[in-house]
Amino acid sequence: MKTCLITGITGQDGAYLAQLLLGKGYRVVGLLRRSASSDIVGERMRWLGILDDVELMDGNLIDISSIIRVIQQAKPDEVYNLAAQSFVAASWNQPLLTGEVTGMGAVNLLEAVRITGLTARVYQASSSEMFGLIQQPVQNEKTPFYPRSPYAAAKLYAHWMTVNYRESFGMHASSGILFNHESPLRGIEFVTRKVTDGVARIKLGLAKELPLGNLEAKRDWGHARDYVRAMWLMLQQEKPDDYVVATGRTTSIREFCRIAFAYVGLNYEDHVVTKQQFLRPAEVDVLHGDAAKARTVLGWQPETSLEEMIAEMVEADLARHRAKMGR
Ligand code: NDP
Ligand code: GDR
């Protein structure tokens, strides 16, 4: 039986990855940082019905002693580093914390694997945000990076350190440059989930308006369930490498709103209002990925369309609100 260690297991991707790997017969160990709200810890894994099947070990990515201890105890064959301060907008308000967790945290993990002398394979969660101010209309592994936020700069550092550990120490360390991926388990502050939650509340008469920021930005959105499969495939390859993971379709926030509201028979223009407070100091205007390498080498492709994903997210938010209302 293989063992994996997942940092960020309580997040969106961590939960789906844990589910995937449990299904493949792995022993799944997750890093859990201490929280005062222990009653809601593991909510996403509970939603997927897998909370009792994973082993949770205490630790924090910025405390290398805890990472070393967890690695020594768990003895993982594969380590997936998904932990991060992952909200781009928050990274301007907490640039140093973002640098520590999202950037240096990844190096703590690489160092911990090196220090413990295990031959564990490592996955680093890199991001399409690293492309930032776009240099090419469609981005692949060869596109130059131009980070536009403290988050993106921190991810770029972690990305290059992963490449460096691979080249310097022969570590089996791979980076997945993943474009935006969403699901019913997406954090509520990210735009897609904010929209589907807003659609559900407006449909059920709990709200009238949905305040958003820039509606013209475009993203290449896929489903998290499809994207965690790509992470696993990267660590099954003989050689470590970097891969872009994307759908190849880009859509504006405005169009996302149109589809989500139309799904419940509403017109987004009657409800969406733009508010200054949700605009960012610098914007990534458009992301559009080319995942040809992942398709060819990993045999990966997305299985969920944008419309199917939006329907799944709206249905889940309707169900959540109906449950709260006792309907
Ligand atoms: P989430 O924000 O849902 O999850 C982040 C996870 O990191 C949570 O489990 C959180 O724990 C944990 N975490 C935060 N700080 C620490 C810390 N100091 N020590 C240990 N754990 C910590 O992110 P996603 O699941 O959406 O994304 C997973 C990874 O992939 C992230 O690194 C993200 O930056 C990256 N990424 C995501 C993309 C996306 O579209 N979703 C695209 C490209 C990259 P807690 O529950 O305690 O807060
Ligand atoms: P992003 O995701 O920054 O791409 O990072 P987010 O959903 O936060 O923003 C996407 C785009 O929507 C615009 N936008 C709004 N965004 C939010 N959050 N709230 C709003 O009200 C709103 N209105 C418009 C934003 O300006 C932006 O252009 C996500 C994260 O998961 C990162 O961790 C990951 O690395 C990247 O995706 C790829």
Image (cartoon, grey):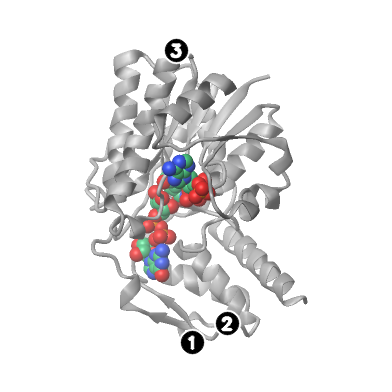
Q: Which residue is drawn at 36% across and 51% down?
A: 288
Q: Which amino acid does label 3 sit on?
A: Gly
Q: Which labelled disc corresponds to residue 270?
A: 1
Front-most of residues 281 and 258: 281
Q: In which quarter of the image is residue 323?
A: bottom right
Percent coordinates x, y for residue 44 in the rendering: 63, 51
The Cα–Cα distance between marks 2 and 1, rounded to whole angstroms, is: 8 Å
- Residue 270 visible (yes or no): yes
- Residue 130 visible (yes or no): no
Where is mark 2, residue-wise? 266
- Please tell me how crowded label 2 is: few (under 14), some (14-19), or many (20+) other residues with Cα within 10 Å: some
Where is mark 3, residue-wise? 117
Quarter placement of the N terminus: top right
Percent coordinates x, y for residue 12 in the rendering: 55, 49
Q: Is residue 60 left or right of residue 24?
A: left
- Please tell me how crowded label 3 is: few (under 14), some (14-19), or many (20+) other residues with Cα within 10 Å: few
Q: Is residue 50 above or below residue 256?
A: above
Look at the numbered disc 2 and give the secondary structure of its residue: loop
Q: Is residue 34 above or below residue 167?
A: below
Q: Which residue is drawn at 66% across and 27% down?
A: 27
Quarter placement of the C terminus: bottom right
